[in-house]
C-alpha cells in the first residue's frame, strides 16, 4: 500500500483508514484538500531560523495530535482555515521569500504531506533557493518521512513525552514516545549534521524541541538525557519554557499554571552538566498569549 494513498489514509500513526478523497475525515479533521490559516514572517523561532528577517511560516489547519494544552486549537481542531491549491501554496512560498524569509517553515503539515511535497518540488524546480523546514509534533511515520528526503532541508520536531501515560492523558497518543523516537532517528539519518550559512542561518540539520510542562521536571530531564546520549551534539536541542495555560480543563489541574522558573533553570543546568553544547534556551517572560498568532488568513488569500 502506498503511504500517500488518500483513499485509505494511513499516513500517520493513527491509521484511520478513511477515504479522504470523498471528504471523509479522520482524527486530524482533514480531507484531501490543503487548508492553511496563516503565512507570514515569524521572528520568534530559534535564532538560526528566524535570523534578522524572519522565518517564512505557513500554518496548516488540522492536526493528528490531541494535546489538551494546544495554543492553536482554533486551527488544530477548530476547523479554521482557507482552502489552498498546490499551485497557490507554491506562490505563497515565493511571496514569503520576497518578503525576506530565510526559509520556508511548514508548521504541522504532516496530514497534508503528499500535497505539500508536490508544492515543495514545484518551488525547488523554480529555483526558490532557501531551505524548507518541517515543523512537526514528532508524531510521524518513518515511511512518510522517507518521502521527504531531498525535499526537506531542516527538521524541527517536538519531543513531547517519554512517559506513555502522559502522552495518553495529554495528547491521546500513548504510543507517542516510541513513534517520536523512530521519527527523529529517521530525520537524523537524512540530516546527520547541522550546517549554517556565513551569517549563522541554518541550512541543513535537525533541531529537536522540548516544551517543558508544569511540574514535570523529571520527565523533561529524561527527554534531554535521551536526546543527548543518542545524538550528542549532532542535533540542536531547543529547551522551551513558553508553556501557556489557555483554556485548560479543571481535570488537568497540573497544567493550569506556567512552568516554575526554578524548574526550568534546573533543567538547563542539568543539560549543561550532561555536556550539551548545541542548545537553545528561553529567557525572560516566555509564557504569554502574545506568542499565539492571529489565524485570520494573513498571507494566504490572494
Image: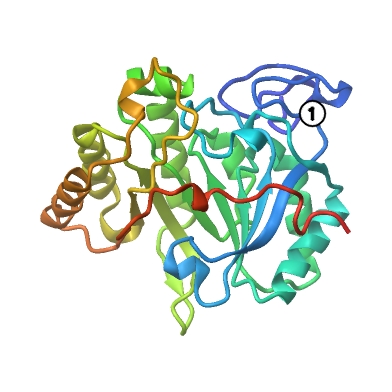
Residue 249 higher or lower than 213, as above or below: above
Asked where in the image residue 225 lies, by quadrant, the reply is top left
Position of residue 300 in the picture relative to residue 105 (left or right): right
Front-lying residue, 89 or 143: 89
Q: Which residue is depicted at the point 68% across and 74% down? A: 129
Q: Residue furthest bottom?
A: 198
Position of residue 247 in the picture relative to residue 227 (left or right): right
Residue 105, given in percent of the width and then of the height, sits at 61, 57
Q: Quadrant of the N terminus?
A: top right
Residue 18, given in percent of the width and then of the height, sits at 75, 17
Secondary element at image label 1: loop
Asked where in the image residue 185 lies, by quadrant, the reply is top left
Quickly name the residue at label 1: 31
Residue 87, given in percent of the width and then of the height, sits at 87, 55
Q: Which residue is depicted at the point 65% across and 43% down? A: 109
Position of residue 79 in the picture relative to residue 265 (left or right): right
Front-lying residue, 36 or 86: 36
Let me know if residue 122 appears in the view: no
Let me know if residue 230 appears in the view: yes
Q: Quadrant of the C terminus?
A: bottom right
Residue 50, given in percent of the width and then of the height, sits at 51, 68
Amino acid at each position: 500500500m502506498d503511504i500517500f494513498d488518500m483513499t485509505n489514509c494511513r499516513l500517520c500513526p493513527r491509521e484511520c483508514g478513511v477515504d479522504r478523497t470523498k471528504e471523509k475525515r479522520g482524527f486530524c479533521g482533514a480531507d484531501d484538500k490543503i487548508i492553511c490559516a496563516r503565512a507570514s514572517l515569524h521572528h520568534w523561532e530559534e535564532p538560526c531560523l528566524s535570523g534578522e528577517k524572519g522565518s517564512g511560516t505557513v500554518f496548516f489547519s488540522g492536526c493528528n495530535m490531541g494535546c489538551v494544552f494546544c495554543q492553536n486549537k482554533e486551527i488544530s481542531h477548530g476547523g479554521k482555515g482557507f482552502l489552498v491549491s498546490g499551485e497557490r501554496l507554491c506562490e505563497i512560498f515565493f511571496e514569503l521569500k520576497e518578503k525576506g524569509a530565510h526559509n520556508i517553515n511548514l508548521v504541522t503539515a504532516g496530514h497534508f504531506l503528499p500535497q505539500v511535497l508536490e508544492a515543495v518540488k514545484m518551488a525547488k524546480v523554480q529555483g526558490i533557493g532557501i531551505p524548507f523546514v518541517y515543523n512537526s509534533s514528532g508524531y510521524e511515520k518513518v515511511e512518510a518521512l522517507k518521502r521527504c528526503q531531498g525535499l526537506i532541508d531542516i527538521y524541527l520536531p517536538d519531543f513531547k513525552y517519554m512517559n506513555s501515560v502522559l502522552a495518553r492523558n495529554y495528547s491521546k497518543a500513548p504510543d507517542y514516545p516510541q513513534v517520536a523516537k523512530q521519527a527523529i532517528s529517521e530525520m537524523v539519518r537524512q540530516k546527520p549534521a547541522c550546517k549554517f550559512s556565513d551569517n549563522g542561518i541554518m541550512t541543513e540539520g535537525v533541531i529537536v524541541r522540548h516544551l517543558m510542562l508544569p511540574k514535570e521536571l523529571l520527565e523533561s530531564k529524561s527527554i534531554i538525557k535521551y536526546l543527548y546520549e543518542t545524538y550528542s551534539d549532532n542535533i540542536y536541542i531547543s529547551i522551551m519554557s513558553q508553556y501557556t495555560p489557555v483554556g485548560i480543563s479543571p481535570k488537568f489541574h497540573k497544567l493550569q499554571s506556567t512552568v516554575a522558573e526554578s524548574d526550568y533553570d534546573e533543567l538547563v543546568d542539568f543539560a549543561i552538566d550532561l555536556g550539551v553544547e548545541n542548545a537553545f534556551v528561553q529567557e525572560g517572560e516566555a509564557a504569554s498569549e502574545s506568542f499565539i498568532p492571529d489565524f485570520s488568513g494573513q498571507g494566504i488569500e490572494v
